[in-house]
Amino acid sequence: MTSEPGIIVDGVTVERGGHAALTDITFEVGPGALMGVLGPNGAGKSTLFDAIAGLLPLASGAIDLRGMERKGAMAYVPQRDNINWRFPASVHDVVMMGRGNNIGWLRRPGRRDKQAVRESLERVALWDKRSVPITQLSGGERQRVFIARALAQEASILLMDEAFSGVDVGAQEGIVEVLQSLRDEGKIVIISTHDLTNIAQRFDQVLCINHHMCAYGPPDEAFTPQVLEELYGSHGLEFAHHHVDPHHDDDGRRLP
Protein backbone atom coordinates (compact mmCIF):
# COMPACT_ATOMS: atom_id res chain seq x y z
CA MET A 1 0.00 0.00 0.00
CA THR A 2 1.10 3.58 -0.67
CA SER A 3 1.62 5.50 2.56
CA GLU A 4 0.39 9.02 3.13
CA PRO A 5 2.85 11.72 2.05
CA GLY A 6 5.19 13.05 4.70
CA ILE A 7 8.62 14.57 5.16
CA ILE A 8 10.84 13.88 8.17
CA VAL A 9 14.06 15.90 8.33
CA ASP A 10 16.26 14.72 11.21
CA GLY A 11 19.42 16.59 12.21
CA VAL A 12 20.33 17.47 8.63
CA THR A 13 23.61 19.25 7.88
CA VAL A 14 24.51 20.14 4.30
CA GLU A 15 27.87 21.44 3.13
CA ARG A 16 28.68 23.59 0.11
CA GLY A 17 32.26 24.38 -0.85
CA GLY A 18 33.59 22.77 2.28
CA HIS A 19 31.46 24.94 4.58
CA ALA A 20 28.21 24.11 6.37
CA ALA A 21 25.34 25.79 4.49
CA LEU A 22 22.80 24.23 6.88
CA THR A 23 23.38 22.83 10.34
CA ASP A 24 21.19 20.44 12.36
CA ILE A 25 17.80 21.08 10.72
CA THR A 26 14.96 19.01 12.19
CA PHE A 27 11.26 19.10 11.43
CA GLU A 28 8.38 16.88 10.37
CA VAL A 29 5.42 17.73 8.14
CA GLY A 30 2.50 15.51 7.22
CA PRO A 31 -0.31 15.55 4.66
CA GLY A 32 -2.57 18.55 4.41
CA ALA A 33 0.01 21.21 5.20
CA LEU A 34 0.91 24.60 3.75
CA MET A 35 4.35 25.31 5.17
CA GLY A 36 6.65 28.28 4.76
CA VAL A 37 10.44 28.24 4.96
CA LEU A 38 11.50 31.74 5.95
CA GLY A 39 14.89 33.36 6.20
CA PRO A 40 17.01 36.10 4.65
CA ASN A 41 18.67 35.75 1.28
CA GLY A 42 21.55 33.28 1.55
CA ALA A 43 20.12 31.61 4.67
CA GLY A 44 20.09 28.13 3.09
CA LYS A 45 16.48 27.85 1.94
CA SER A 46 17.39 26.68 -1.57
CA THR A 47 19.97 24.33 -0.09
CA LEU A 48 17.26 22.74 2.05
CA PHE A 49 14.96 22.30 -0.94
CA ASP A 50 17.77 20.78 -3.02
CA ALA A 51 18.49 18.35 -0.19
CA ILE A 52 14.83 17.32 0.15
CA ALA A 53 14.65 16.82 -3.62
CA GLY A 54 17.74 14.60 -3.49
CA LEU A 55 19.91 17.00 -5.50
CA LEU A 56 22.47 17.51 -2.73
CA PRO A 57 24.17 14.95 -0.48
CA LEU A 58 23.82 15.23 3.29
CA ALA A 59 26.90 15.71 5.45
CA SER A 60 24.94 14.24 8.36
CA GLY A 61 21.37 13.51 9.39
CA ALA A 62 18.60 11.92 7.36
CA ILE A 63 15.58 12.83 5.25
CA ASP A 64 12.69 10.37 5.10
CA LEU A 65 10.13 10.94 2.35
CA ARG A 66 6.99 8.93 2.97
CA GLY A 67 4.50 8.26 0.21
CA MET A 68 7.13 8.69 -2.50
CA GLU A 69 6.85 5.19 -3.92
CA ARG A 70 5.43 6.55 -7.17
CA LYS A 71 7.77 8.31 -9.56
CA GLY A 72 6.84 11.96 -9.88
CA ALA A 73 5.22 12.17 -6.45
CA MET A 74 7.29 15.30 -5.73
CA ALA A 75 7.23 18.44 -7.86
CA TYR A 76 10.02 20.99 -7.38
CA VAL A 77 9.83 24.54 -8.76
CA PRO A 78 13.25 26.20 -8.35
CA GLN A 79 13.88 29.92 -8.13
CA ARG A 80 12.88 31.84 -11.25
CA ASP A 81 16.52 32.79 -11.90
CA ASN A 82 17.27 29.08 -12.39
CA ILE A 83 14.58 28.61 -15.05
CA ASN A 84 15.23 29.21 -18.74
CA TRP A 85 12.34 31.56 -19.51
CA ARG A 86 13.49 31.86 -23.13
CA PHE A 87 12.60 28.23 -23.74
CA PRO A 88 10.16 28.30 -26.71
CA ALA A 89 7.19 26.53 -25.14
CA SER A 90 3.53 27.36 -24.75
CA VAL A 91 1.65 27.24 -21.47
CA HIS A 92 0.06 23.96 -22.61
CA ASP A 93 3.46 22.45 -23.48
CA VAL A 94 4.95 23.27 -20.07
CA VAL A 95 2.02 21.72 -18.20
CA MET A 96 2.08 18.63 -20.44
CA MET A 97 5.70 18.12 -19.31
CA GLY A 98 4.21 17.20 -15.94
CA ARG A 99 2.72 14.10 -17.56
CA GLY A 100 6.17 12.78 -18.48
CA ASN A 101 6.22 10.32 -15.60
CA ASN A 102 2.79 9.00 -16.62
CA ILE A 103 3.17 8.65 -20.37
CA GLY A 104 6.94 8.31 -20.81
CA TRP A 105 8.87 10.47 -23.20
CA LEU A 106 8.47 8.23 -26.25
CA ARG A 107 4.68 7.93 -26.30
CA ARG A 108 2.35 10.63 -27.55
CA PRO A 109 -0.07 12.08 -24.98
CA GLY A 110 -3.40 10.33 -24.87
CA ARG A 111 -6.91 11.52 -24.04
CA ARG A 112 -6.34 11.15 -20.29
CA ASP A 113 -3.16 13.21 -20.45
CA LYS A 114 -4.83 15.99 -22.42
CA GLN A 115 -7.76 16.00 -20.01
CA ALA A 116 -5.37 16.21 -17.03
CA VAL A 117 -3.64 19.22 -18.57
CA ARG A 118 -6.93 20.94 -19.28
CA GLU A 119 -8.25 20.35 -15.76
CA SER A 120 -4.99 21.60 -14.26
CA LEU A 121 -4.98 24.78 -16.33
CA GLU A 122 -8.64 25.44 -15.62
CA ARG A 123 -7.97 25.11 -11.92
CA VAL A 124 -5.35 27.89 -12.02
CA ALA A 125 -7.50 29.97 -14.43
CA LEU A 126 -5.08 29.75 -17.35
CA TRP A 127 -6.88 27.52 -19.84
CA ASP A 128 -7.64 30.55 -22.01
CA LYS A 129 -3.90 31.22 -22.25
CA ARG A 130 -2.89 27.66 -23.09
CA SER A 131 -1.40 28.65 -26.47
CA VAL A 132 0.49 31.68 -25.18
CA PRO A 133 4.31 31.36 -25.01
CA ILE A 134 5.40 31.24 -21.38
CA THR A 135 7.80 34.10 -22.14
CA GLN A 136 4.81 36.43 -22.50
CA LEU A 137 3.31 35.72 -19.07
CA SER A 138 3.54 37.81 -15.92
CA GLY A 139 5.42 36.54 -12.88
CA GLY A 140 2.22 35.44 -11.16
CA GLU A 141 0.97 33.66 -14.27
CA ARG A 142 4.24 31.80 -14.65
CA GLN A 143 4.00 30.53 -11.09
CA ARG A 144 0.44 29.35 -11.75
CA VAL A 145 1.70 27.47 -14.81
CA PHE A 146 4.15 25.55 -12.63
CA ILE A 147 1.41 24.81 -10.11
CA ALA A 148 -0.66 23.44 -13.00
CA ARG A 149 2.30 21.31 -14.09
CA ALA A 150 2.50 19.86 -10.56
CA LEU A 151 -1.24 19.15 -10.70
CA ALA A 152 -0.86 17.38 -14.04
CA GLN A 153 2.07 15.44 -12.57
CA GLU A 154 -0.26 14.29 -9.76
CA ALA A 155 2.42 15.20 -7.22
CA SER A 156 1.61 14.78 -3.53
CA ILE A 157 4.48 17.06 -2.41
CA LEU A 158 5.10 20.48 -3.97
CA LEU A 159 8.27 22.49 -3.27
CA MET A 160 8.32 26.09 -4.50
CA ASP A 161 11.52 28.07 -3.97
CA GLU A 162 10.90 31.84 -3.63
CA ALA A 163 7.50 31.41 -5.27
CA PHE A 164 6.49 35.03 -4.69
CA SER A 165 9.63 36.74 -5.94
CA GLY A 166 8.66 39.35 -8.54
CA VAL A 167 4.94 38.64 -8.04
CA ASP A 168 2.63 41.51 -7.08
CA VAL A 169 0.46 41.30 -3.96
CA GLY A 170 -2.77 40.63 -5.84
CA ALA A 171 -1.23 37.73 -7.75
CA GLN A 172 0.25 36.38 -4.53
CA GLU A 173 -3.21 36.07 -3.02
CA GLY A 174 -4.47 34.13 -6.03
CA ILE A 175 -1.52 31.73 -5.86
CA VAL A 176 -2.02 31.19 -2.12
CA GLU A 177 -5.70 30.37 -2.64
CA VAL A 178 -4.79 27.64 -5.15
CA LEU A 179 -2.11 26.26 -2.83
CA GLN A 180 -4.53 26.26 0.10
CA SER A 181 -6.96 24.18 -1.95
CA LEU A 182 -4.17 21.67 -2.60
CA ARG A 183 -3.45 21.54 1.12
CA ASP A 184 -7.12 20.90 1.79
CA GLU A 185 -6.89 17.87 -0.51
CA GLY A 186 -4.13 16.39 1.67
CA LYS A 187 -1.08 17.50 -0.29
CA ILE A 188 2.09 18.93 1.26
CA VAL A 189 2.97 22.38 -0.08
CA ILE A 190 6.25 23.97 1.05
CA ILE A 191 7.18 27.47 -0.07
CA SER A 192 10.37 29.35 0.70
CA THR A 193 10.38 33.13 0.99
CA HIS A 194 12.47 35.90 2.50
CA ASP A 195 9.48 38.24 2.69
CA LEU A 196 7.65 38.56 6.00
CA THR A 197 4.92 40.86 4.72
CA ASN A 198 1.54 39.85 3.30
CA ILE A 199 2.03 36.09 2.98
CA ALA A 200 3.84 34.92 6.11
CA GLN A 201 0.74 34.68 8.27
CA ARG A 202 -1.05 32.53 5.67
CA PHE A 203 1.10 29.45 6.38
CA ASP A 204 -0.02 26.67 8.73
CA GLN A 205 3.57 26.11 9.86
CA VAL A 206 6.77 28.08 9.36
CA LEU A 207 10.37 26.91 9.51
CA CYS A 208 12.67 29.85 10.26
CA ILE A 209 16.28 29.26 9.25
CA ASN A 210 19.48 31.27 9.00
CA HIS A 211 21.97 28.48 8.27
CA HIS A 212 20.60 26.83 11.40
CA MET A 213 17.11 26.25 12.72
CA CYS A 214 15.72 29.30 14.52
CA ALA A 215 12.10 28.18 15.05
CA TYR A 216 9.42 25.83 13.77
CA GLY A 217 5.70 26.01 14.43
CA PRO A 218 2.59 28.09 13.72
CA PRO A 219 3.43 31.67 12.68
CA ASP A 220 1.97 33.18 15.86
CA GLU A 221 4.32 31.04 17.94
CA ALA A 222 7.40 31.07 15.71
CA PHE A 223 7.54 34.80 14.99
CA THR A 224 8.86 35.97 18.34
CA PRO A 225 10.89 39.21 18.47
CA GLN A 226 14.00 37.18 19.26
CA VAL A 227 13.57 34.90 16.24
CA LEU A 228 12.76 37.78 13.88
CA GLU A 229 15.81 39.71 15.03
CA GLU A 230 17.96 36.63 14.47
CA LEU A 231 16.57 36.34 10.95
CA TYR A 232 16.35 39.95 9.80
CA GLY A 233 18.08 42.19 12.32
CA SER A 234 16.49 45.62 12.81
CA HIS A 235 13.91 44.98 10.06
CA GLY A 236 12.75 41.90 11.94
CA LEU A 237 12.45 43.90 15.14
CA GLU A 238 10.34 46.48 13.34
CA PHE A 239 8.04 43.74 12.01
CA ALA A 240 7.78 42.28 15.51
CA HIS A 241 7.00 45.73 16.93
CA HIS A 242 3.93 46.02 14.70
CA HIS A 243 2.83 42.39 14.38
CA VAL A 244 4.00 40.47 17.43
CA ASP A 245 4.34 42.91 20.31
CA PRO A 246 1.20 42.49 22.46
CA HIS A 247 1.48 46.12 23.58
CA HIS A 248 0.46 47.34 20.12
CA ASP A 249 -2.83 47.04 18.25
CA ASP A 250 -3.23 45.83 14.67
CA ASP A 251 -2.38 49.29 13.32
CA GLY A 252 0.84 49.52 15.28
CA ARG A 253 -0.51 51.98 17.87
CA ARG A 254 0.66 51.45 21.42
CA LEU A 255 -2.07 50.18 23.72
CA PRO A 256 -2.65 51.90 27.09
Image: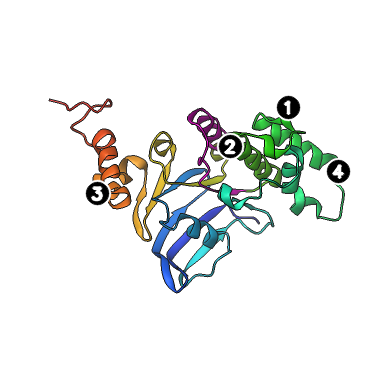
**Which SS class for mark 2?**
helix
Q: Is residue 245 left or right of residue 25?
A: left
Residue 226, given in percent of the width and then of the height, sits at 24, 49
- What distance separates the C-alpha of mark 3 from that of mark 4? 55 Å
Residue 150 occupies which quadrant of the picture? top right
Q: Earlier in the sequence, mark 3 or mark 1?
A: 1
Q: Amino acid at mark 3?
A: Gln
Give residue 128's mark. 1
Residue 34 higher or lower than 231, as above or below? above
Residue for badge 2: 139
Q: Earlier in the sequence, mark 1 or mark 2?
A: 1
Q: Is residue 145 left or right of residue 186?
A: right
Give residue 35's mark. none
Q: In terms of depth relative to the viewer, which is nearer, 72 or 168?
A: 168
Q: Amino acid at mark 1?
A: Asp
Residue 254 higher or lower than 89, as above or below? above
Which circle, 2 or 3, is nearer the viewer? 2
Image quadrant in which the C terminus is located: top left
Q: In terms of depth relative to the viewer, which is nearer, 175 or 112?
A: 175
Residue for badge 4: 110
Q: Earlier in the sequence, mark 3 or mark 4?
A: 4
Q: Residues within 10 Å of mark 1 (few under 14, many from 20)?
A: few
- What distance separates the C-alpha of mark 2 from that of mark 4? 30 Å
